[in-house]
Image (cartoon, coloured by chain):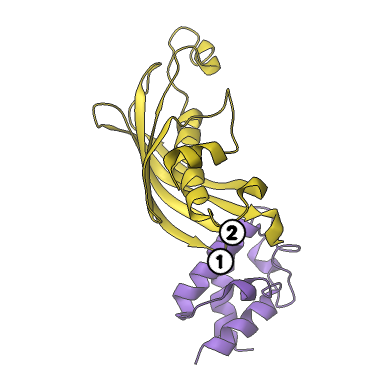
Amino acid sequence: MSGEEIIAALPYGEPFIFVDTIDMVTKEEIHGSYTFKPEAFFYKGHFKDLPVTPGVILTECMAQIGLVSLGIYKMQDKDLSQLQVAFTNAQTEFLKPVLPGERVVVKAVQKYFRFNKLKCTVKLYNEGGDICAQGELAGIFSTKDEE
Amino acid sequence: MNTKHYDELKNIIKIYLPEDVSVDDIKPTSHLTQELNINSANLVDIVLDVEDHFDITIEDDEIEKMETVKSAIEIIEAKVL
């Protein structure tokens, strides 16, 4: 399954998709990237006079690449049109700000995938290679035909 | 039912209880999701902790049978030698 096919199977759309590329994926690990659009809606209010990417949006970007994209790859043999994802756990720390227009790289490694729950350690890097955010994210994946 | 296993399971479950459920609410007959309000994501973590603690492996179809504390103990005790 290619990066393009994973992105096509993602259940997100504008203005809430934060994945541009999936550059590497195995059963245990995934790398992807996203460039934050300077005109994105959240910069108008976060903050009023100082646009900085909100932590919740960084977390969402980490989850879309590091959790959901990896989960789709792992569940590629299932009927992905029936895929449902529930984001269940996030423990994240934010180390450096990400500004409008910055490109970030997200790298995730699986901790476990058991009973349809995927847990990953995820890191988000800026172009300089600095870690801007890192944490552990988990979600439950199901396809309706399983039930 | 072995009280040692029961107490050990209780110690694992209590980590995942929602704030409005107390450890004293845990009874052998307690339904894990319906009475103790443990969600399915936390139930997976309980099972993974149970596997580590008792050094056993729980299969996919067995997690569905772990409805109450008692039924969880029965599955654990069938595997612990």
Q: Residue at x 53, y 62 (%)?
A: B45
Which element type, helix, strand or loop, lies under badge 2? helix
- Neighbour class for label 2 at 10 Å: few (<14), some, many (≥20)? many
Instruction: Name the disc covering residue B42, or none.
Output: 2
* Residue type, mark 2 in image: Asn
Shade representing chain A:
yellow
Image marks 1 and 2: residues in contact by CB distance under 8 Å: yes
Chain of the residue where label 2 is placed in the rendered structure: B
Q: Quadrant of the N terminus of chain B?
A: bottom right
Residue B46 visible (yes or no)? yes
- Residue shown at 38%/16% (left/top)? A101
Are labels 1 and 2 on one chain? yes
- The local crowd at label 1, few if under 14, some if 14 to 19, many if 20 or more residues have their Cα within 10 Å, is some
Residue B41 sits above or below residue B52 on the image: above
User: In the figure, the purple chain has which letter?
Assistant: B
- Mark 1 lies on a secondary structure that is helix
The numbered dot on residue B46 is 1
The image shows residue B39, relative to residue A59, as above or below, that is below
Tell me: residue A127, above or below residue B20: above
Q: Amino acid at mark 1?
A: Ile
